[in-house]
Amino acid sequence: MLVMVAWAGRVSGAEPNYDESKVPAYKLPDPLICEDGTPVRNRRDWERRRRPELLWLFEEHVYGRAPTAPPGMWFERAGEDAYALGGRATRREVTLWLRGDRGGPKMDLLLYLPRGRRGPVPVFLGLNFMGNHTVHPDPGIRITTAWVPNDRAGTVVSNRATAASRGWAASRWPVERILERGYGLVTAYCGDLEPDHPEGWKLGVRAALSPDGTNHVFRPDEWGAIAAWAWGLSRAMDYLEGDRDVDARRVVLIGHSRLGKTALWAGARDRRFAIVISNESGEGGAALTRRRYGERIADLNRRFPHWFCGRYKSYDDREDDLPVDAHELIALMAPRPVYIGSAVEDRWADPRGEFLAGVHAEPVYRLYGLEGLGVTEWPPVGRSVGRYIGYHVREGRHDLTAWDWERYLDFADRHLRGR
Ligand code: GTR
């Protein structure tokens, strides 16, 4: 029973607030004022002083610090089919040996590239929750050999994936549509970097890249799972820069929910990503934490103690003391376009708080002479708004849907193809 309650919502403490009138008065940190009180007057001040300072604050207090790329990393082509999906695509599978040795951690990338492409194509890159073979029923995708959350084949429950889970997450990955619109899709399983449970780090890069391995004791500012997954996205980018069929200057990073938090953090740290899309990333992602609406820091720390750095635990019920908030995470994408997608029934993720983070990130886009959202009123359900900061709140529940994808494809078209 306890376990069921744990997964259904808060483990203890107060009920989540879903009443807008009970959102407390709050004061957001100013993205244009440095910690020592110096104002940010122009792009140069932002780039030289405030941006690095904010990155440092997010590392120190929220996600934790990740190491640089290991020197020995190499890539191995693991599979290729130029006539995949009934001739619509090239399916390519590539293994990234992250530490250089075959005994070390690896990440399997799955690429679908449109057939009939002329030259390198822009791609969407996103981590998946359950293994590459879950994004499409295509029987040619190799089944992950990494730890997975329960894969139920009949009555057998195990942490080894089987063919039964092929295509499980296909509704979130409209591969044919993405290809038809002229983009490739690149995905990898987050569990290759770190299985998503509190002991998962022992099987992932956080142990494998540490000199003391699974005996490692984390300092309060060292990386959590989200930082490890984000680090993996940068390693995927390292590979993409050398793939001649991919235009590495046009990589759109996308993530849903916990992997939306991950996409934002990866996009903030690594400016090689051209566009960043957060789909319903919520608390610890795009939602303003100071609103204390829906999920709160204490919920994240109780239910997912492995996601953030150790110091983040000291902010349970102390949202106002956190030196940063979500609008500054969004602002770290500037001047690159960023899109925030919400769903109206996804109150746990605070859809309005996600919108407001976009609103309060705008002053940084203005330093570059760019229009962000262009609106201050929360737009009606089902309408996409914004220039360099895109936003929508759609009908329905917490999910990544075909409707969301159409908005993201349109946004990418506008910025990457001048449409
Ligand atoms: C929820 C968690 C959210 C969100 C979501 C998800 O249980 O509270 O922060 O990340 O999981 O990733 O699906």
Image (cartoon, rainbow, N blue to C red):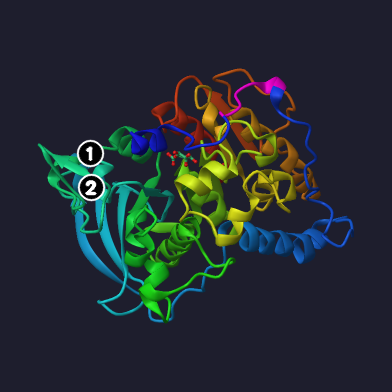
Q: In this rendering, would 31 be left or right of 343?
A: right
Q: Label 2: few (<14), some or many (≥20) within 10 Å?
A: many
Q: Amino acid at mark 2?
A: His
Residue shown at 74% from the left, 30% from the top: 24
The earlier-in-sequence mark between 2 and 1 is: 2
The x and y percentages for residue 272 are: 55, 60
Residue 152 lies in the magenta stretch: no
Q: In this rendering, would 337 be left or right of 33?
A: left
The x and y percentages for residue 321 are: 74, 50
Q: Nearer the viewer, residue 261 or 107?
A: 261
Q: Is residue 393 above or below residue 138?
A: above
The x and y percentages for residue 230 are: 48, 58
**Cβ at disc 1 under 8 Å from ligand 1:** no
Q: From the image, tell me which residue sits under label 2.
A: 133
Q: From the image, tell me which residue sits under label 1.
A: 167
Secondary element at tag 2 = helix
Residue shown at 72% from the left, 35% from the top: 359
Q: Label 1: few (<14), some or many (≥20) within 10 Å?
A: many
Q: In the picture, which quadrant includes the C terminus?
A: top right
Q: Nearer the viewer, residue 372 or 215?
A: 215
Q: Is residue 361 visible?
A: yes
Residue 17 lies in the magenta stretch: yes
Q: Is residue 275 above or below residue 229?
A: above
Q: Nearer the viewer, residue 272 or 122?
A: 272
Magenta region: 15-21
Q: CA distance from mark 2 to mark 1?
A: 6 Å
